[in-house]
Structures are given as C-alpha cells and as structure tokens.
Amino acid sequence: MSQVSIRKVVKSYEGGVQAVKGIDLEIADEEFVVLVGPSGCGKSTTLRMIAGLEEITAGEIWIGGDVVNDVPPRDRDIAMVFQNYALYPHMSVFENMAFGLKLRKFPKDEIKRRVDEAARILDIAMLLDRKPKALSGGQRQRVAMGRAIVRNPKVFLFDEPLSNLDAKLRVQMRTEIKKVHQTVRTTTVYVTHDQVEAMTLADRVVVMNHGVIEQVGPPQELYHNPATRFVAGFIGSPAMNFLPAELVDDGGLKIRLATGEKLPIPPARLDRYGKAKGRRLTFGLRPEHLTETRSDEKPGVVRIQANVDVVEPMGMETMVHFFTDGVPVCARIDPAVQARPGETLALAADLNQMHLIDDETGRVI
Amino acid sequence: MAEGTTDVPIAGYSAPRPRAHGSALHRMARRRSTTALLMCVPLFALLAGFVVYPFFYSIYLSTLNRDMTRFIGLFNYQYLLSSNTFHLVIFQSCLFAITAVFLKALIGFILAHVMHNITGPDQKLWRGVLLLPWVIPPALSTLGWWWMIEGSYSAVNWLLQQVGIHPIAFLSSTAWARFWIIMVNVWFGTPFFMIMYLATLKSVPDQLYEAAAIDGATGWQKIRFISFPMLKNIISITTLFSLIVTFANFDIVQILTAGAPANTTHVFATYAFQVGINSGNIPMGSAVSLFMFPILAVFAIFILRGVTRRTREAI
Amino acid sequence: MSSATLAAGAAAPRRGRRPSIARERRWALWTSYIALAIFAVGFLIPPYFELVTSLKTSQEIGAGTDPWFTQHLFFGNYTSIIHNPQFQIFFLNSVKLTIVVVCVTMVISVLAAYALARMRFFGSQMFATGVFLTYLVPESLLFIPLFKELANLHLINNTWALAFVWPTLSVPFCTWILIGYFGSIPKELDEAAMIDGASHLQMLWKIFIPVAMPGIIAATIFAFTVCWGDFLYPLAFLFTSKQMVLTAGIVSTLIHGDVLDWGHIMAANILASAPPILIYAFLMDYYIAGLTAGATKG
C-alpha cells in the first residue's frame, strides 16, 4: 500500500512568497503521475516536499497511510532521481547503488542480490565497476534509476531526470523509464517541464501553474478536454491558436471573431455555449484542426482565407503561419498542398474540435 | 572550481520557516545549526585563544612600562615616534615592501605571459623549475643567499673579481644590504605572482584573443585590452596580499642583516624582535608590532572587497 | 610579442601573410623559451650554490678556489650531519610537531569548513569572513604578546608550544579553501545522501571528504609547508637545542656553534629543504591548486 496523498499543502518562503498555494492530490498505488508546468509553477517544490527536502508550511502529506510531515527523508521510504543525477563521483556504480542499503545495514549478499537485479533490469551489469565519470549521460541516468530501484521504496520521485540529455537520448530514456515502471510497478511522481514527456509517461498528468493545480487527468483527457485556458495552451505542440471572440445570434448561434468573420457553432455544442452569449470569450483551435480544404468536408467544418506569412515544411506536415487581425495563427497542412508566403490560402477549420474560453474565469466552457 | 566561497552556502537550503513550530523537520534544522556551531568550536577556540586574545593583550602590554609593572599610557608609542631608529624602520619597511612587491608583480606578470605562450608538458616542466624558490623554506634559502654574498671572499665577490671588480662588503653597506634584501624577497616571491597570474590567464577564453586579433589588435594591445582587464582583480588581490606579507616579513631581513649596519635595514618585524625578545622590552616590542596594524588593516579591507567582488562574479 | 606588433602592423601583401603568421608564432615561442631559460638559471643559482657548497670539504671551501664548482664530489658533510645529534633532534622535533599540527589543522578545518559551507547558522557568514581576515594576520604582528602568553602558560622553550601557535598560521587558510571546495559540491549530492539515509557525520566522512579530496590534499600540503618552514615562532619561543626545530635550529644553533662549517650547514640546509621539495615534486598540481585556491576560489 503506497498511495500518496497531498492535502491542502502550502509552501511559503520567508518574505511571504507562496510557491505552492494549497494543493490537493491523491496518487494511487502503482500509479505513474507526472507534475508538469512552466518553471516556477511549484512542481519541483511539491516533489521536494514529498521527499522531505523542503518543509511543509501547512497541510499534510501522506505516504502509504501515514502522515509524513515530520518524518525526515531517510525514514520516508522514498527514492529520488535528480536532474543532474547526483551520483557520488568517488564511488563505483555498484557502490553508488549499494550506498543507501549499506547505510541501512543490509547484509552483504542481499545488497549484491538487489544491485545485480537492478543492474539487470537497467542493462548496466557490465558497468558496475566503473566510476560515474567514465559513463555517458544515458548510463548515468540508468545508474541514478538503479540507485532508486535497489531500495525498493514505496515511492519513486523523479525531478526532471531527462533534461540534461540530448533530444535523441531523451526519447530513448523515456521509453526506458516507462518500461522500468511497468516492471517494478512502484508508485511514481515525476516532475518535468516537457509536456511531451508528461503525455507519454503518465497514467495521469497534473498541470500546475503559479502554485496551483490547473487540471488533473489522463493525457488524452487533457488534450481533448482542457479545463482551463492555461492547460489548453500548455498541452499540445505547436500550441493551440487563441483568438478573441464573442457569441452572436445571427440566424443561429455564431462566433464572431475580431475580424468580423462569423463562424457557425456545430449543433452538438449549441447547448453548451448557449449561456455564454454576451461574454468576452477566447476562441481556441489546435493547428491540427486547421488544415487544407477538401471536397468531402464533414459538417461543422468551415472555410477561412489566410494570407500566408511563413511556411515551415516539416516533412510529414507543413506548418503555415498567418495573422488574423494581428494575432498569429498556425495551421497544419498536408505537405502536398502548395503554400507560398504572400499568397492567399483557403483553410478548413474543424469547429467540432473548437474550444471556447471564458476570459473572466479562464475556464473552458 | 569557479565557485565562490563566502556566498556559497546554498540558496536551495532555505532556512525552514519559524511558523511551522514544533515539527520534527524544524527540530532537525535547529539541531543542524547546533551541530554546525559545535563543529566550529575548535576553530573558534583556536582563533580566540591565539589570535584575538593576543591581539588585545598586545594592546594592553604596549601601555606598560618596561618591567610591566606600571601603566604608562601611550608613552611607548610617543617614544617610538620620536626615535630616529624607528623612523628608519618605517622608511625601510615601506621601501622594502613597495619596491619588492612592484618587482615581483612585474616579473611575475612577464613570466606568466611568457609561460602562457608555451603549451603542453613543456609548460609543466618550466613551471616546476620556476616555482622552486617558493617551495624552499625562506629561512633556509636566505641562509644560502647569505653565504653567497657575505664577506670579501663570497661567491658573488669571486665572480666580480673575475671581471676585475674589487670585492664589495655587501652586507656592511646600507644601500647594498637593502638591495640584497629586496633581491632575495623578489627571488622568493615572484613565483607566487607568476602562478597566480598564469592560473588566471588560463581561464581567459582563447576566443577573446582571437576576436581581438580579428579586430586588429597588436600583441601589446592584446595585453593592454584583454589580459590586463581580465587580470585586474587578481593583480590587485595578489598585490595587496603580497604587500601584507612583505611588509610584515621577518625571515629575510633577520638572517641577512638582522638590522645591521647600525639598525638601518630593520623592518617592523625584526625591530620588534630585537626590542621585544632580544632586549626583553616586551611592551615596546608590542608597540612596534602594533604600528603595523593600521596599514595591514587597510590592505586587508581592500583584499576582502576584491575577493567578495570576485566571488560574486564567479556566481 | 614585439614580433606580433610588427606582423600585425605592417600592411603586408596578401600572399606574404600566411608564412608570417607561422613565423610570428615561432618567434614568440623562441622568445618565450629564451626568457624562461634566463629566469630559470637565475632562480636556480642559490639552490645550486648550496648544493655545490654542501659537496665540498671544509679545506676546499677555505682554500678560496672557484666557489661555483667543486673539484671532486664529497659526501662527508651529509654523513656527518646525519649523525650529528643536534641535527637529529631538530629533525625529529620538526617531524613530530609538523605531523601533529597538520592533523590538528585538518580536523579543525574540515569540521569548520563543512559547517560553514553547508549548515548555515546564525552569524556563519560573518564567521567565514572572520576566518579569512585571520588568514591575513601575519605572524610578526602577534609574536610578542604570544611570547608573554606562552610564558604565562609555562610553555616557553617547549617544542609543544608550537602545537598551539602553528595552527593559527595554517587553519584559517585551510578552512577558507575547504569552504570553497565543499561549497562547489552540488547540493543534490547531499540531498541524495540524505534520502539514502546518511547522517551529518556520514555525509561528511563518506561524501564530502572523498569528493573534495583534491582540496583536502592541497590544504594538507599547505599546512605542512607553513609549519615546516616557519622560522619566527620557533626562534622567538624556543631557546635550547633540545626543543629546537630545523629552521631556527640550523640558523641559530649550527651557525653559533664553535666552527662555522659551511659544508655542514649547507648539507643540513638541503636535507631540511628536502621534504617540502619532494612533496612538491610529486604533488605539484595539488600544491599549485592549494596555492592559487585562496584567491581564485574565494
């Protein structure tokens, strides 16, 4: 039983700066939860409070059924992987992994058994005699994970473990971490600022901003149904397009953009948006839902004209950037379609995928 | 290596807030600062007992009469200030410190640049040879110097004779004695400057020199506009530090001349030794030493400023 | 350097440029080597002269022949100085006291540096600055009150007095550079150790000291050099040859002995200089690191 509960947890520093402003989060046994958000959002502080490296100003943190507010890190039965790995430079890989067990006075053969087992899982058995200096970035990362695994703790804590690796290795290690979790099934809290990491690794993603939780949910849920403007803009790459808009009744409910252009609301959304008439709104549409036109368009797809500004061919797709009433907009089109800067291009906007955000609350309607 | 010290102790370790009273973590933090204090106790005791206490004791001693039986106020200081010998001591100390430090800094600067031109294992070898004077205990090497220059039959005089110059009684002449005192100090101290400058030169990125070369800088201009500004801080720290050490130097003067001829080559340290230890006038000796203090304190403050600035830049 | 001026200053035709850069480099290199050679010879004259003298018989020294060379190598000065009971006492005292003081220094400095670098407490910043300032206090400022203080403690003319006063010369600098070395250890390392279950002492012993080993070695070398070479304190506080250490012993006692035998004195001199030179020869990089650390690190 190693669920983690965070209850009304606040962290404030001297001088009154609040890094975490009273968050609630329940993490189930064996779950892989990723805390994601921009730097300074409080995600690392939250993780460090779970680890016991930061004091909790108010609220409670439970690990496996006990309040751990007053428990020092070594007695919390957690293991942590740091951004810079924090491997002990003077110890061999074996000693690095064995250190925690040695301090806890495990018998020698048990230590060896566990280290060998972890080394096997992580495929670093042939590195056990080396010093960290002689390892590549990816290998160091594995050793850092090995150090966590051997302890067989209740909870794994990862603090941006992949941000020191180059892009290719990062993808590879991401898969590795996922695989390890599937093997050992230890409850994991993982902090990152990279939304792709969050989406690919997590059972559930926790999006944080300014010390509060914006939304908690499975990756697909966050992508399709963001709860707030922040989540809508943060998840997904390239980011969602936002345009100021309002709802008007003009032979049916329509969105009027700042350009004066009016887009009809798909029938399925009429109920949901009915009450928002007259409010200041933001219209949101992901680039992948703003594509080249086709002859057999579904209902709910409308055509707009774009004055192409910049074209970025990516191979699999092409990004087209243009401005609507001074606001930059990005569309994602088939590379077969010819688009040249300065030309006008007809695009299809799939309004079935649109989002409407109430400017006052910042929440998605 | 490039991390500073005074400010190092770690921003991340934010002190726990006092508000969360009674928590175990907080207790642990309090215990941590108690442990820390305990760990500093030996250092504190040492410095209190053998640096701070003797300093104040020295002030007290300097206000006593020769037999240390009576308080005589500032009489010892007054006496010294009116004594001709002491005027000479002040003059000789300043002359010695300023000349020697200037020469050490200059030669050290040149040597560091010359050394910087050479790369690879060669540099290490030359560095090893040129650092040797700094490694030998100065009292012992000065004894070698003394044997080399003292008397009409000394090795240096022998060399002079070979080119037809009459032997010179170097250490019986005030001017020559001063010359050799400075010479020995420069010989001993230059490697320190060289190695400090060289370490800093190595930390200047090559691209700066390449950029300067592309901008059309000549060799001298590279030194003037790149090396010198980059070394400015370390030059001032090293110079001030060396001024303190040279100003307070004892070994060289004591062994070469012990103040002779006629007390004309005494510096503060040797004069204090003669008055305080040899003649047994401890109060007067204390007063002589204490005269150094204001000068040293000014230098020390400037060093501290330089070091703090350097530390900040490093972070 | 002057060649660089010439080459860059002259508006040379395009074709002449490439070889001139190579020539300029070679020129600079040669000038450097020549300058270094001149200084190296100058720097080595005194040690060389000591060595030559130590290899001469007293007859040869007295004969007024060429003092810079010896007719034949004579090692008798070394054998007789090694068997000289006074010299043996000096050497033994120096070794004894230096070892004790180096150990004391390292214990005090490591504990204090760890506390000051990692466990901030009230006034720790000020304290670190204070340590640096005491490093700037020269020995010649305090030897007279120390003389009186040691007399009050009945430690005058007692070798062990040095065990109290020598650490004041070594500890501040060692503490200072160790604060720098400890401070440069990433703090994630202690957090990892904390999670692994290490106590403060375990963290110091198993993480900080091994990781900062270059700094520890540099500080040890520094402490050794300072104690071994100190002249003023033993000269001021010790009188009889039984209590004396090498530096002051050679300069005061051997010279003031009955015969001024320079072959002997120089042999003693070289033997006394040997330990620091040997350490330097084998650990030059640490030596230099320690030497430069004071200003470049902090």
Image (cartoon, grey):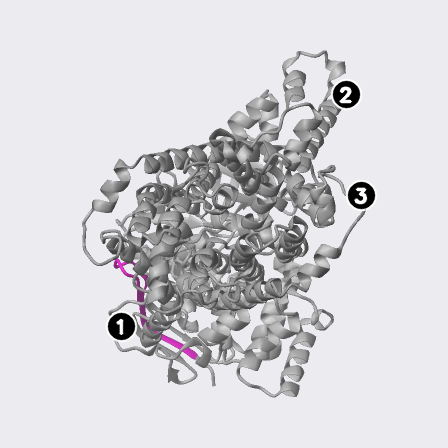
Question: Looking at the picture, which amino acid does disc 3 mark?
Answer: Gln
Near mark 2 (Cα within 10 A), the count class, few <14, some 14-19 or many ≥20, is few
Question: Looking at the picture, which amino acid does disc 1 mark?
Answer: Ala
Q: Are marks 1 and 2 in contact (CB under 8 Å)?
A: no
Q: Which residue is the extreme one toward the front?
A: C258
Residue sitting at x 81%, y 46%: C72
The residue beneath circle 3 is C71
- Relative to residue A151, is residue A231 drawn left or right? left
The CA span between labels 1 and 2 is 74 Å
Residue sitting at x 56%, y 79%: A185
Residue sitting at x 18%, y 54%: B71
Label 2 marks a residue whose chain is C
Residue sitting at x 25%, y 46%: B76
Q: Nearer the viewer, residue B245 or B235?
A: B245
The residue beneath circle 2 is C19
Q: Nearer the viewer, residue A238 or B131?
A: B131
Magenta span:
A4-21
